[in-house]
Amino acid sequence: MTQINDIRLPSWISPGMVFQQGVPVILRGHVLKPNIPVTLEVKKDPTDGRKVSKLDTDYGVILSLETTSEEDGSFQFEIPPYRSSTDAYTLVFHSLTKTLTIEDCRCGDVWVMFGGKPFCTTISETAAPRTPLKKDVMPLIRFYSPKRGILTDIEKLSYEPVFMEDENSWIRIRDTQALMSVSSVAFSYAYHLAEQLHYPVGILDLAEDYAPIYRWLSHDGIDGSDTIREYLEERNLYFSEEGWRANVARLTQKMDAIETGRILKDETVDESGEKTSEESFVLGDEEKCDVPIDKGGALTFGDPEDEEKKEESDSETADTDATKETTMAETAEDATDASVVSETEEGDDGAEEEKPAADTDENAGSFEAPETVEEPEEEKPLLFPDDEIAKEKKNNHDLISSILPEADTSTEKLVNEASHKPLVGPEDMMSVFYNHKLAPLCDISIRGIVFAPDASDAQIGKEYTTMVRQLLIDLARVFGPRSIEDKHQVPSFILLALHPDAMDPEKPYQHVEFNERLSAIRRSFPMPIGILSQHDMLLPDKSMSFALGRRLSCLALGLHFTPKMPSSSPECVGVEVIGNKIMLSFDNTVDGLRLAENESILRGFAICDESHVYVPASAKILHGVRVMVWNDDIEYPAGVTYGYSPIPHQATFRNRIDIPVLPFRFDRIPSEYCPDLTFAACEDLSFIGKKTWDSEFEKLPTYQVTKGKANIFREVMNKTQGAASLRIEYETENSLLSFGPVLSYASCMTPLRFSNARRICLDVFNPDQVEKTMQISGFRGEATIAIGLRWQTITLNWSSFDEMEISNLSFTIFDRQRQGAIYVDNIRFLN
C-alpha cells in the first residue's frame, strides 16, 4: 500500500506503474477523514530530452480532478483514456495539507500472468538468453511481482478479498536485486512484446509454485456453481465461512502445539516389531512430511489431538456447511448457461470428446465420427466485463466488497464442530489466491491474460471446463475495462498446455487428455483465446523459459495486433480421406508448416483401420498448408493421431514462426494407441527421455550392445526409407554379436503392446562377402542374411500364442568372421 500521512493507495498505484492504454483508468484510495476534498493532477513529460513549450497542452499538467471522500474515507478518480507512449506520467494527490506523488508512470499494455510452473520460475533460477538484449527495449518493461510462497503462512489467510496489500511495488529494469525475483517467462514475454510494439509493457506477475485452479476462484463463485462446489466437497476442499475459520483455527492450534513441543514425532511399534514415527502437520518450505491422501485425492492432515474427540463424536451428525446467498449466484447461473465445450461419446477414460471438423468431398471418403451433442442455438458471449456484473455495481471494488461475508459464530465452537473433519493444509485451501493476489488488483484494466494450469489440475476431469469459465467470470470482477467500445479492447486469454513432465506414471494419458480439454476450451469460448503447446521443449535447459516467453508473445501479437502472427499453436481443423491417404488441414500456419531444425522426415503420425489399433504412418507436407498421411499396409484408414503419446518424442512439426503443432487424435473411440517406436526408424542414435520417473529429461542412447563389441553409426547414404539407417561395425564374441534398442528407460513405458502384430520385419544390408544369420529375442527361429550387396528383408514370427508384448528386444548375429559390418533399417511389427 502506497501511503503518506493520511493518503493511502493500493500498492499497484506506485512509482513505475504501467496503466492500460485506450481505456479509462480508475484510481481509488483512502484518507483518514470523511467529507474532505481530494484532488488529482496528472502531469506528462517527455523522456527523450526534447524541450516542450509551455503552450503545448500535451505536456505539463494535462488533467485536474477533484472529489470528496466518502463516509468511510474512500475516494475515487477516473482518468480518461490515453494513447500509449514512452512519455512519463506523474500523479499528484492532494488532501488538505498532505500531498502524495506517484512518479515515472507509463501508458502501455498491462498483462496478467498467473498459474503454476513454469511461470513461477524466477530470473535468478535461469540462464541468460543466447542472444544479447537490446538496451532501448529494456526501459519499456516493468513488473508488479508480489512475493511468492508467503500464503502458506496461516496467520495471513483471509476468507474475504483483501484490497490493500503492503510491501508490493512495480519493478523496473534498474531494480536489479528485485528483478531477480521476477518470473523469467514473464520477463521474456514483456521483452519480446515491447521489442515489437515499441511502447511500455507491464506484467502483473502472480504465478505460484503450487497453484491449482480452485485457489484462484472466488468463494462466491464456488458457492454459485453446484459442479465446482460438489467437486471440492467430495475431496474435503470446500469451505463455508464457518468451515474456513474453523480450519484456520485448527491449523493455528497445530502450529502452536508444534512450536511449544506439545506435538512431537510419536514412535509406535508396528506388527513386524519395527518402530515407526507419525509426524503431525509441519509448517515451513524446507520441512516436508508425508501427507495422507484421501480416496478423492485431496491432501489432508491428520490431527492427533482430535482423534479422541472424533471417536467420542462418531454417533453425532456432522454439521453441514452453510452457504451464503448473494447476488453473484445469479451471475454464476447465467454464466453456466453460456457456451460450454461440445461433448461427444466418451471412451474408457470418460472425458469429453473433441474432434477436428472433417472436410467434405464427393470423391473422398470420410471418417465416421462419434455422435455429438448439439450446442445451444444462442450462445451467450463471455465478455470483459461480464454483462450481469456490469449491471450490479459501478466499479470492481464495490463488486468485490458486496461479497464480503459476516460471521458471528465463536471460533471455539467452530473448532469443536469441525473436529471430525480432515484438516486441510494452507496450500490446498480454496480461494486463497483470489483473495490475496487478484482482489488487491481490482480496477486495473488489462490487455490480456496468460494462464499456466497447475500440473495437479490434470486430475480434475470434465469439471475443469466449468472451473475455467468461473475463473474468467472472477477475473472480470477484478480487472477492466468495465465497458467495451471496440472489440479489440476485449482482453484475450492465452493458455499454456501442460508439459510432458507433468505426466502421472500411473495414468500416463491423463495430462494428454487434459491438454485436449484446453484445446476444446479454446474452440468453444466466444472470446480471443490461444493455446501454446510445450511438448517439444523436453530438455531442462535453463534458457528455455526465454524461448517460451518469445512463443507466448507471438500468440499475443497474433491475437491483438497483426494477422501475420499466429493466435494459437497450429491445430488440425480438417480431415479428408482419399483412397488410403488422409489429408489434414491446419489453422495458424502463418507462412506455412515446416519440419524442426535438423529434421528431414515428418514423423509422429499414426493411423488405424476399423480395428482401431494405431500403427506408425508416413507423412508429407503439401505446399506448406496440408499434410498427407498414409501406411501402405492400411487400405481403408479409419483414424489418425499426431503426437498422441505421454511423451511425444517424434512430434517436432511446427509453423515457420517456430510454434509447434498441437498433438491430437481424431476421436475418442477406445483404441490401442501406437507406442513410442523411436528406435524403429533407425535414424537417431539418441533421444530425449527419462531413465527413471524421478529423474529429469536428458539425452539418452537409443541403442546398446549386449554381447561383443560394436560401434553404431548413423548412415545417411545407404538406407531404405527415412533419413538414415544404422551402420554397425562390430567384433564378435564367440562368433556372436547382440545389440538392440534400450527399452529399460522409464519413458519407454514398456511393455510395448502390439495386439494385432504377429511378426517382425526389418531391412538389412550385408557389406561382407560372408553369409550370416540373425535371431531376435521373443521370435521363433533364425533368418539367413545372404551374400550380396543389396537390401534384404528379414521376417520372424512371434514365438507365443499370446498378444505381442515386448519389454526387451535384442538382435543377435552369428558370424564366423571375427569382424564385420551390418546395416539395419525400418524395423516394423506386422500382422
Image (cartoon, rainbow, N blue to C red):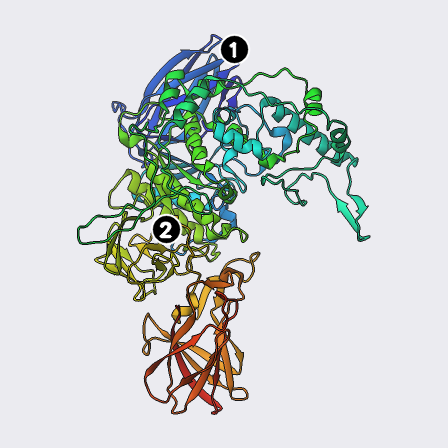
Across and down, in percent, residue 144 comes to 46, 35
Answer above or below: position of 43 versus 69: below
Answer left or right for 343 relative to 323.
left
- Work out whether residue 130 or residue 264 is closer to the camera in this orientation and state it: 264
User: Hey, what amino acid is under mark 1?
Assistant: Lys
Mark 1 vs 2, N-terminal side: 1
Label 2: few (<14), some (14–19) or many (≥20) C-alpha neighbours in 10 Å: many
Give the numbered dot on residue 648: none
Count of numbered circles on the image: 2
User: Hey, what amino acid is under mark 2?
Assistant: Phe
Answer above or below: position of 706 versus 619: below
- Work out whether residue 759 or residue 238 is closer to the camera in this orientation and state it: 759
Q: Which residue is mark 1?
A: 33
Q: Is residue 423 visible?
A: yes
Q: Residue furthest left?
A: 362
Across and down, in percent, residue 327 comes to 45, 17
Q: Is residue 195 visible?
A: no
Q: Considering the image in quadrants, where does the C terminus appear?
A: bottom left
Answer left or right for 27 relative to 619.
right
Q: CA distance from mark 1 to mark 2?
A: 61 Å
Across and down, in percent, residue 381 comes to 32, 28
Give the SS element for disc 2: strand
- Work out whether residue 514 or residue 196 is closer to the camera in this orientation and state it: 514
Label 1: few (<14), some (14–19) or many (≥20) C-alpha neighbours in 10 Å: some
- The structure residue drawn at horizontal position 55% and vertical position 57%, both measured from the top left corner, is 693
Q: Which residue is mark 2?
A: 664
Answer above or below: position of 796 versus 66: below
